[in-house]
Amino acid sequence: MKRNGRTVLIALEIATPFVLVTLYALWAAPRDSFFFPPLGEILAALRADWFGERILSDIWPSIRRILLGFSLSAILAVGLGFALGLSRRARIATAPLVEFFRALPPPALLPLTILVLGVGDVAKVLLIALVCLFPILQNTIAGITGIDPTLRETARMYGITRRGELLHVVLPGALPAIFAGLRTSLSLAVIMMVISEFVAASNGIGFGIWQAKRLFDIPLMWSGIIILGILGYILNMALLQIESRVLAWHRGARKAAE
Amino acid sequence: MLAVEQLGRDFGAVRAIAEISVTFEPDRFTCIVGPSGCGKTTLLKCISGLLPPSRGRVTLHGRPVTRPPREMALVFQDYSRSLFPWMTVRDNVAFPLRKRRDLDAAALRELVEESLAAVGLSDAIGRYPWQLSGGMQQRTAIARAIAYQPEILLMDEPFASVDAQTRADLEDLILAIRRRYSMTVVFVTHDIDESVYLGDRVVVLGPPPTQVKEVLEVGLPAERDQITTKKDPEFLRLRSHVFANIMNREEQG
């Protein structure tokens, strides 16, 4: 019964996009609209351009920017989150700053980074890193301050060294929250990649979409949007896979608590 | 020898513990019993070195205790919050032993397995705490404490959150462990029957600001039994005596 329910859910997940795409194809085919081209033209552009030479010239540079920016911010934010999570004073001192950056719409930083850092790859990576920093930072702090004090007292009672406590008690205890931050930041990374490539770039998926729009190559623009969606989906699935491995205990514990 | 010397503890302006002096002789089982909110946990935390006292001090072999000493292990009341959910039962028990240089891998493994066998958990060694019942989780915490090979075992209302039958099992388990390993036990409880059933000695605390009301020697044979011991006239005499003392009532008959 349970297994059956699972199969139904997976079938639904696969079927829904197919139904939507088919509906679009049926709707667009007889119209021959300029802005909503027939599905065949979009798929042709997808195959010829995006799965052709653009894999190396546009898709790969975008992926690289996302991964570099995201990893950089993950390392910085978890490190900084540890420092702030463990010290109440540092937390109080930096709270207004963290809150300010969190409230700021991320694209607002774009003009600033273009002025200061330019339009190169480094600038894009740093912009992505800067924007991704705050969700991970906030979640890391929340994860550390939320650890049950009894767990840390247990570690102290049994003579666990400071290093052992940080590595084997504080880090695993904060990991569920850290992953929540990583998920938020990963989607922000994709958004910032696209925006920064719209504004100033000579390659990338965002650049490709913008260029196609300027050249009125509408099928190419649509296929670029599809590529972005697929990329975001794959990245998110990859992170969820890592999370379900690293946090298997957490899922089990939560199920047991229900 | 473990000694609490004129110990007092305040929380802000609130005087939780007024003054307590009590000594714990080696290999004796002392139960500390008192009304709820009388600062039993606070006292135990001060003894363990987790909480600094406001006045007085705790000494172990004449040296003041300022942080948790190697000679002590503590079993917390809330097992679900003191076991690490990301570690298996084996890793939870082995975790405090990771810096023990006198144990090689094989000796460590044996120690962990023997401790788990002593609490009857050999079969659960590879499971996670959240896969176990409450009683089994507390057994894991007890195994962790005995694997640490302490001189002094501190227990903070360890059986307060399990059902009555599990509780009786765990009481007998702790008596068996105590016979097998020589340890000084300091056992905090709010349950008067439990304190008389387990202890060689019962320390009765009053309401806050807390002081020691009375120290009673338990004149029961070393072998205890849930049915016969609890019918023993000495048991019945002691439990009504402690009850009357805690409830501030005159003893009847």
Image (cartoon, helix red, strand yellow):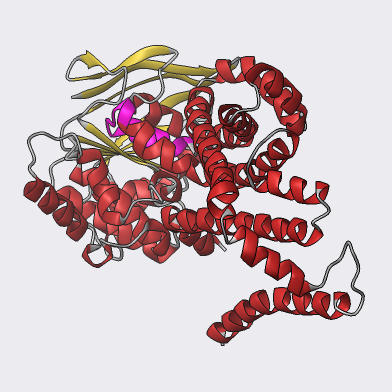
Q: In the rendered view, tell whether residue A151 sits above or below residue B134.
A: above
Q: How many badges with numbers are in the image?
A: 0
Q: Nearer the viewer, residue A4 or B237?
A: A4
Q: In the rendered view, tell whether residue B158 sits above or below residue B5.
A: below
Quarter of the image with the N terminus of chain B is top left
**Quarter of the rendering containing residue B139:** bottom left
Residue B93 horizontal/vertical position (percent): 25, 48
Q: Is residue A165 visible?
A: yes
Magenta residues, as a range?
A149-163
Q: Is residue A200 left or right of residue A84?
A: right
Q: In the rendered view, tell whether residue B240 sits above or below residue B227.
A: above
Residue B198 horizontal/vertical position (percent): 29, 49
Which secondary structure is most common in the magenta stretch? Answer: helix
Q: Residue at x 49, y 40 (%)?
A: A174
Q: Is residue B213 visible?
A: no
Q: Nearer the viewer, residue B241 or B146?
A: B146
Q: Is residue A163 left or right of residue B146?
A: right
Q: Is residue A39 magenta?
A: no
Q: Residue at x 45, y 28 (%)?
A: B42
Q: Is residue A155 magenta?
A: yes
Residue B221 horizontal/vertical position (percent): 18, 52
Residue A195 horizontal/vertical position (percent): 73, 39
Q: Is residue B43 left or right of residue A187?
A: left
